[in-house]
Amino acid sequence: MIDDHPMIIEGYQNTLLFTKKESQELFVDIANNCDEALKAMNKSVENERPYDVLFVDISLPPSSDGSMSSGEDLAEYARKILPNAKIIILTMFNESFRIHNIIKTIDPEGFLIKSDLTSNELASAFQAVLNNPPFYSGTVNSHIRKTIASDIVIDDKNRKILHLLSQGIKTKNLVAHLDISLSAIEKRKKQLREIFEVSDGQDETLLSEARKKGFV
């Protein structure tokens, strides 16, 4: 279990120990940051006792060498060294772009938004991930349904532009976050306005229409 709040991990542990099936035996290791998580994962491989399930929070203190900056990076690393482990993502992030990106890069067996989480939901998610994955919480499913129901196709770059704009970042500053030029960004914003049928050229109008379709 990887989370930088010990009380949250204690809650997870207590829930799973209380609700596990009689046939199940749980051995839980804890990490509060990327360094501890890396050490534990590597050790489990070296000892030939690889983890069966990983609970990974997205927002974590980065590793000391700078190679890992979030739980997302850890989960991608886990996919390489622990190919049989089931990954359950737990996060406060509920923006459409982040949800889409996590599903695309990690494809977790479990994906829970912390604001949705109850003890019953955590217990249900754990059993579902073990026996019949994936298990997504309500907010995740809602974003997926909105995106599937829409006939609009938007690539990852355009999704990121929408996400950054929704965070209040000005167009002129988007270059620092994207590996494309300002003119390319302007062209993509024009495409987005056409896709969402926005005629006034205002970022807020674009974001409003994108939210309605579940892209922000």
Image (cartoon, helix red, strand yellow):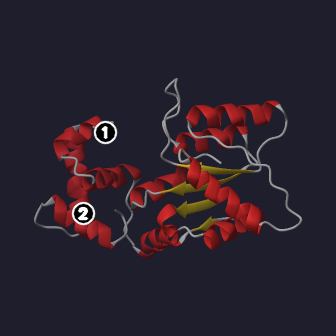
Kindly state the secondary structure of the residue where label 1 is placed. Answer: loop
Residue shown at 55% from the left, 69% from the top: 137
Kindly state the secondary structure of the residue where label 2 is placed. Answer: helix
Residue shown at 55% from the left, 67% from the top: 117
Q: Position of residue 124 (x, y in %)?
A: 68, 71
Could you tell which of marks 2 and 1 lies nearer the N-terminus? 1
Q: Nearer the viewer, residue 68 or 171?
A: 68
Compared with 54, 209 (above or below) is: below
Q: Nearer the viewer, residue 101 or 125?
A: 125
Q: Amino acid at mark 1?
A: His
Compared with 160, 205 (above or below) is: below
Residue, disc 1 = 177
Q: Position of residue 67 (x, y in %)?
A: 52, 28
Q: Position of residue 78 (x, y in %)?
A: 66, 41
Q: Total marks drawn? A: 2
Quadrant holding the C terminus: bottom left
Q: Quadrant of residue 22?
A: bottom right
Please say if the residues under marks 2 and 1 sit with CB atoms less than 8 Å apart: no
The furthest residue to the bottom: 149
Residue, disc 2 = 207
Q: Is residue 107 visible?
A: no
The furthest residue to the top: 65
Q: Is residue 137 visible?
A: yes
> Going by the image, does 108 lie left or right of 21?
left
The furthest residue to the left: 200
Residue shown at 39% from the left, 72% from the top: 151
Q: Nearer the viewer, residue 137 or 203?
A: 137
